[in-house]
Image (cartoon, grey):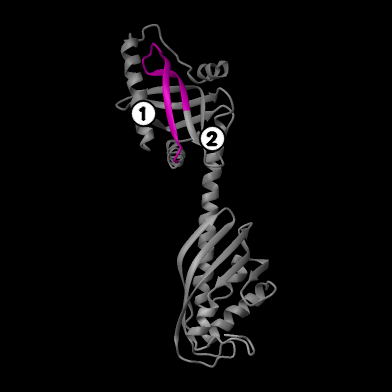
Amino acid sequence: MKILFSIVTAVLVLAVSGCAPQVDVEAERAAIRKFHDECLTKMLAGNVDCFAEDGQMLPLDATPIKGRSAIGELVSRMLEDPNFSVSHDVIDVDVFQSGDQAYVHYAYEITMSDHDGNPVAEQGKAIYILKKQPQVGWKILIDTWKADGESMSDALVKTEQMTAQAQVEEQNKALVRRILAEGDKKNLEVLDEVCASDYKVHFPGNAMPIGLEESKKLWQSFQAAFPDLTHTVEEIHADGDIVVVRESVRGTHEGEFSGIPPTGKKIEFSAVAIYRFSDGKCAESRTDADLLGLYQQLGMELRPKEGEND
């Protein structure tokens, strides 16, 4: 706590003249306690207006969060954690004789999810440094804290990591959608942009994975047989560097396909594809498609091998 009070001493430099007006310190303390309680309630609802526009969160061993907007983003991400909860217990309130600066010393307990999604509680001590602004009232200039055990910054770091990972997952899903959408437009150059140079494709009927150029030829063979080929994303999910998509594939059989002459039939079959990303590029994909259903729609009949019993 010595470090905390050192920060308070360094930040709250107050020049008080000998003729400064008298302040009802006890009344201000009561007002600040009320402000503190209302502030916590607002923050749990995602409202960080109790911070000054240039307010800061200063965990003693983590990167500062500067500005009300950045604090609001952090609080919003914390509130997305299903295990998140926080409580404060005010220990002391000190109001300076000027009546426009103060600090609140409080104990906190916060619960957040660990990497496995399990709730983990943490306790510590903290200080609000407050400034009373004209026609606005008390606002938090600095919120600084230190956990009793492990650093509270671990929770902030984890929140930032979760946010970054979610952004990467959304980006990867967007890239998969782009592959399918641009592929349907016959813009196969998208594969050069989105996929790694050593991109590998595992597709039914191919004993070995095929590379980037071979995957273009696979697209082209389907598009030659089904010129209006389209992929509709029914479901798409991302977890880490993996994206899984369930899609419906539709088209009209207007060209030869696997030795089957054009039938003019409308076809539709389902597929599930798994994409693996690395360094922002699609590195590998595996597709499980209902090709049997496709062949049946094109008129192919299943017959037992000659000599086999029924």
Secondary structure character of the magenta stretch overall: strand
Q: Is residue 272 visible?
A: yes
Which quadrant is home to the C terminus?
bottom right
Left or right of 272, for residue 137: left
Query: Height in image: 263 above or below 281?
Result: below
Query: Is residue 185 positioned above or below 283 on the image?
Result: below
User: In what element is the residue under mark 2?
Assistant: helix
Picture quarter with the N terminus: top right
Residue found at the far front of this picture? 309
| Span highlighted in magenta in the image | 82-109
| Mark 1 crowd level (few <14, some 14–19, many ≥20, 10 Å Cα) | some
Which residue is under mark 2? 155
| In the image: residue 211, left or right of residue 194 | right
Query: Label 1 belongs to which residue?
Result: 39
Q: Residue at x 35, y 36 (%)?
A: 45
Which is more toward the observer, 237 or 277? 237
Q: Give the quadrant of residue 92.
A: top left
- Between residues 173 and 274, which one lies in front from this camera angle? 274
Whether residue 294 is situated above or below residue 141 in the rendered picture = below
